[in-house]
Amino acid sequence: MNQKPNNNNFGSLMNPVPNESVVDQIITRITDAIISGELQPGQKIPTENSLSEAMNVGRNSVREAIKVLEAMGVLNIRRPEGTFVAEGFSDRMLNPMIYGLILEGGSSPAMIELRQLFDVGILKLAIEKATEKDIKHIFETLTELRKVVQKQQPDKNEILDADIMFHRALEAAVKNPLVNKIGIVIERLSYPTRARAVEQFIRNGELNELLEMHEQMLNVVIERNEAVVGQIIDEHYKYWKEELHK
């Protein structure tokens, strides 16, 4: 005989929810329980019947909420064992965030400002945390960027890919998994804007300026010179903004 779970074991997760926006309320309740630690990665959550009864909501609403969270990569449905909290990061978790940011303000100016704020923080943390091995890796990505930039017929996609690898190397030097995940979101959101900027640099014959910006960022990390971070990023993005508005 299946033993009925003790609702006290799951804290606020098992409290009744208001009738308004029931599915959203259930989603919020489950995610809050994960954030607070009431539900741990890999832990099996209560059954649909248990959640429905404890929250005083319909079982269909619980099932719909679980489907949404499963699609987002937050929960894993394993039949016939049950439903479990995801144990690790999934790319599916990024999609709702990306779509939401696009709808909220994925325009070029907003995207540039977001990347500018992010890059200032990345550079400051890289100055603090980068090891010699990290600096070597950043230098290697800069070398690859220099190689594709200096080709007789520069290719936009090659330059953009090399630029992305350079910034990923900076992010890796920070050694913060949360930063890396947010970096993926910003990278995907900013890709069209960055592609337009690279096209402008190629069209105007100003790829050396693009390369110089990245060389400055590496030098700041090597010299551990946090005082000039804001100035370098401001110059970088001022030039980028001008290119996008030409």
Image (cartoon, helix red, strand yellow):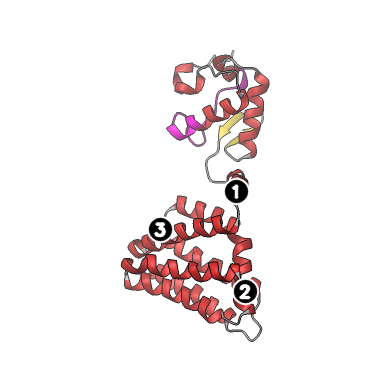
Q: Nearer the viewer, residue 23 or 12?
A: 23
| Mark 2 vs mark 3: in front | 2
Q: Amino acid at mark 3?
A: Gly
Q: Amino acid at mark 1?
A: Ile
Q: What residue appears at the point 42 percent right and 61 percent down from the top-left corner?
A: 120
Q: Position of residue 210 (x, y in %)?
A: 52, 76
Q: Position of residue 153 (x, y in %)?
A: 66, 83
Q: Is residue 9 above or below residue 197?
A: above
Circle 2 residues within 10 Å: few <14, some 14–19, many ≥20: many
User: Marks 2 and 3, how far apart in space?
Assistant: 26 Å
Q: Nearer the viewer, residue 9 or 209?
A: 209
Earlier sequence position, callout 1 versus callout 2: 1
Q: Secondary structure at mark 3?
A: helix
Earlier sequence position, callout 3 versus callout 1: 1
Kindly indicate whether the residue at mark 3 contacts the one at mark 2 (C-beta within 8 angstroms).
no
Earlier sequence position, callout 2 versus callout 3: 3
Q: Position of residue 86 (x, y in %)?
A: 55, 38
> Can I make out residue 161 in this image?
no
Residue denoted by label 3: 121
User: Marks 1 and 2, how far apart in space?
Assistant: 26 Å
Residue denoted by label 2: 200
Q: Amino acid at mark 2?
A: Gln
Quadrant showing the N terminus: top right
| Residue at the bottom extreme of this rendering | 152
Quadrant showing the C terminus: bottom right
Q: Nearer the viewer, residue 140 or 221?
A: 221
Q: Is residue 105 magenta?
A: no
User: Marks 3 and 1, how far apart in space?
Assistant: 20 Å
Residue denoted by label 1: 98
The magenta stretch is 32-49
